[in-house]
């Protein structure tokens, strides 16, 4: 496939360095670098974070969104009553 791409200067330098190291064409160096980048992306480990217990909830969180909405409505109403 033939296409036109615009490379940032640092990326171009990476390709040109590969060309010099391996004595290959620009096309071959670019293709090799893209393939290597994809392989390393495939080998990435899944990210996870450690969790900690925060203890028992002090409020019932089952209706947390409703409660947040009610609090927001109260703030809006207070703002409207106060005027501009």
Image (cartoon, rainbow, N blue to C red):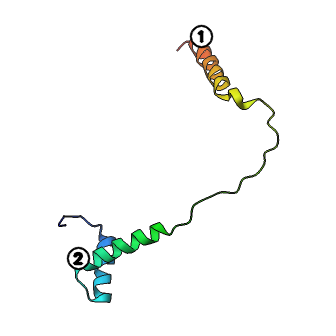
Name the residue at the top extreme: 81
Q: Secondary structure at mark 1?
A: helix
From this view, report whether residue 21 is shown above or below residue 68. below
Residue name at image x 60 percent, y 14 percent: 77
Residue 20 x/y as whole percent: 29, 87
Question: In the rendered image, which residue does mark 1 sit on?
Answer: 81
Name the residue at the left extreme: 2
Are circles 1 and 2 on residues that touch, CB within 8 Å? no
Residue name at image x 30 percent, y 67 percent: 8
Q: Earlier in the sequence, mark 1 or mark 2?
A: 2
Q: CA distance from mark 1 to mark 2?
A: 68 Å
Quarter of the picture containing the N terminus is: bottom left
Residue 2 x/y as whole percent: 17, 67
Residue name at image x 76 percent, y 52 percent: 52
Left or right of 77 in this view: 15: left
Residue name at image x 56 percent, y 66 percent: 45
Residue 9 image label: none
Around disc 1, counting alpha carbons within 10 Å, would you say few (fewer than 14), some (14 to 19), or many (20 or more)?
few
Q: Can you tell which quarter of the image residue 32 is in? A: bottom left
Residue 73 x/y as whole percent: 61, 18
* Front disc: 1 or 2: 2
Left or right of 56 in this view: 81: left
Residue 7 x/y as whole percent: 27, 67
Question: In the rendered image, which residue does mark 2 sit on?
Answer: 27
From this view, report whether residue 2 is shown above or below residue 17. above
Please tell me which residue lies in front, 51 or 77: 51
Around disc 2, counting alpha carbons within 10 Å, would you say few (fewer than 14), some (14 to 19), or many (20 or more)?
few
Q: Secondary structure at mark 2?
A: helix
């Amino acid at each position: 496939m033939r296409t036109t791409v615009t490379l940032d200067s640092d990326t171009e330098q990476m390709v040109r360095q590969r060309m010099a190291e391996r004595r290959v064409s620009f096309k071959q160096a670019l293709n090799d670098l893209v393939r290597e980048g994809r392989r390393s992306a495939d080998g990435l480990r899944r990210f996870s974070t450690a969790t900690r217990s925060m203890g028992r909830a002090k409020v019932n969180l089952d209706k947390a969104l409703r409660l947040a909405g009610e609090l927001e409505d109260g703030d809006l109403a207070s703002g409207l009553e106060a005027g501009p």
